[in-house]
Amino acid sequence: MAVDNVEATLEDFLALKRRGQLEPTRRDGGQAPLGEVRLALDSCCVAGGTQRVREAVERAVQDLRLPVAVRGISCSGLCHQIPLVEVAVPGKQPITYARLQPEDAEALVRRHFQPQRLTDRVRMAAVGFLDRLTSAETPQAVTRYAVEMRDPMICAYLGPQKRIAMEHAGEYPPLDIDAYMARGGFAALRQCLTGRTPEDVVAVVKRSGLRGRGGAGFPTGTKWEKVRQAGGSPKYVICNGDEGDPGAFMDRMLLESFPFRVLEGIAIAAYAVGAEEAVLYIRAEYPYAVDRIRRAIAICQERGIFASPDAPAPQQGASGFPHPFRIRLRVLEGAGAFVCGEETALIASIEGRRGVPSIRPPYPSESGLWGKPTIINNVETFALVPWILRNGAEAFAAIGTEQSKGTKVFALAGKVRRGGLIEVPMGTTIRTIVEEIGGGTPEGTTFKAVQVGGPSGGCVPASLADTPVDYEALRAVGAIMGSGGMVVLDDRTCMVDIARYFLAFTQKESCGKCTFCRLGTKRMREILERLCSGHGRRGDLEKLEELSKMVQQGSLCGLGQTAPNPVLTGLRYFREEYEAHLEGRCPAGVCKELIRYAVTEKCIGCTLCAQVCPVDAIAMRPFARHSIDDAKCTRCDSCRKQCPEDAIVIQSPRSSNGHEG
């Protein structure tokens, strides 16, 4: 995403939402279909330009009068390759194109599809010849975008992955229920309605070792068992889709790409505990996810898979179903409060109250929504359930570690070559994820740390990169699993600045109920801001540690209890950086008030730095060594990035050591 394409991206986003279609667009004209062009149209792909590519392909298909289907499919997880387009021609292997641009859409269509009528083929050839004849530019072959799925980089990205929640990613449209059922969809729910007892379902989930994927890692089967055994009626199921971590988009992708799988998991949970109503609580910032889930619910009801508990009993359910599953499904949109990811705050929000955590016990399994027994699991947890019932508890338990079974979806982002959505077996090491799957940090940089678990997670240094990703191992090094955000940091990242960034987020999102969280995080942020501005005081680091422990011990909910994690892991593994800030130095060259830009003798006087400086801090002196007016300089870094000779370095005012660009 760049500044100059924000407006176009938003227009695409709104246009696609108004169209509300992911079904194939066909231009048959009475002819047999020649094949199809497939594009993922979830939020991140649209933001990356895929919608503009789709429109260009549709125009080309229409102009060339070709019977070709243009289909929107589920996310493949290859976010670093978007716009990603797959061309499927009957009898041939599908061909994938990465980072395709709208202007290449017609060349793509011409390369793979030829009209069946002779007149249309002649017309198509003539138009192509005239285009080449009148164009002033030499066209580049569209094959430059082609990628081989056996390519070493693609294999390195996909090879270590094991997809369960993301099973069949990129294979079919998210709202094509027939395609979902052809791949085993709703088979697990059908088992429940044709003989598998609720007790058996709970037992299978318990044996599988599935733990909640929302962060705490509580055993899912145990939670379901408590709700089933709890007195009181009615009982409820809540799907927590309030994903608030910056840089995390696992739940959004699952809701947008696999809505039927999530709904099947919710229905199985409702069957297991005897609930007749389920609520999907999804962030209002996820309009695609909300829209697709609502449409998926409507499709399931039309096909006789679900029916409202008060609706008249139909004669027969969907194919293979003795009757529809009786459940009332509601979709509620959250207002974006991070604290509403905490289950008691989420319940308060659903009930129309202010989203503030409450004291436990009683737990939601005893007294949840409207004071009744309630299951709360996150989106990924529900998405794993159908696979477990279809393949057996033992198959799931065979994946992962002794205490952390199965797989985990992560949003791999930050300073990494190949970012995207990945799903790996529990116990996969951080090194495997960052260096093998992610391809390591960009050229010229060094892997420094990885921030795991969102704003409440911890920073694990590169020296501990062989730490396996499971609940216990991450907790031992000061981090948490969280919902699955994983941000890679390189040697140009300031650990004090990172801690300040995440603490500012959690401090702002604090509900204010607990004094320790409300004021403790504020005082911690003030100390970090002092350090980053060069005004650190003796004893600040000790005070940070003391405040962190107080906030952890005195806060009611997970937000306050985990908010100090970025600070504590920073002090534990990168204390020398904190001490350098006390001395007025930023070793990474990030904190603006602790650095200055200088021009070295490498300067050749090309004037490029002066041309890009937005505040005229560099006087233009052709063929002479330039200089930077420190009083005017805003430390925007434009000059260093533009310099072709790496002649501009970052220095700390109290140090002569420079950080070259």
Image (cartoon, rainbow, N blue to C red):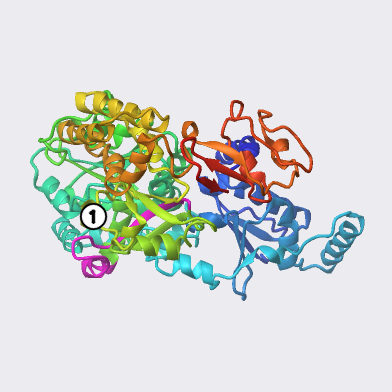
Q: Which residue is mark 1?
A: 471
Name the quadrant containing residue 338: top left
Q: Is residue 161 magenta?
A: no
Q: Residue 572: where, in percent of width, then height?
A: 26, 47
Name the quadrant containing residue 436: bottom left
The span picked out in magenta is: 391-415
Name the quadrant containing residue 345: top left
Residue type at mark 1 is: Tyr
Residue 279 vertical placement versus 199 (above, below): above
Is residue 315 something one can see in this rendering? no
Q: Residue 94: where, in percent of width, then height?
A: 59, 69
Is residue 204 something one can see in this rendering? yes
Q: Residue 249: where, in percent of width, then height?
A: 42, 46
Residue shown at 64%/40% (left/top)? Answer: 639
The one nearer the camera, 6 or 545, is: 545
Q: Residue 201: where, in percent of width, then height?
A: 19, 59
Q: Is residue 548 left or right of residue 135?
A: left
Label 1: which secondary element: helix
Q: Is residue 560 left or right of residue 317?
A: left
Q: Quadrant of the N terminus?
A: top right
Residue shown at 44%/45% (left/top)? Answer: 493
Residue shown at 38%/35% (left/top)? Answer: 583
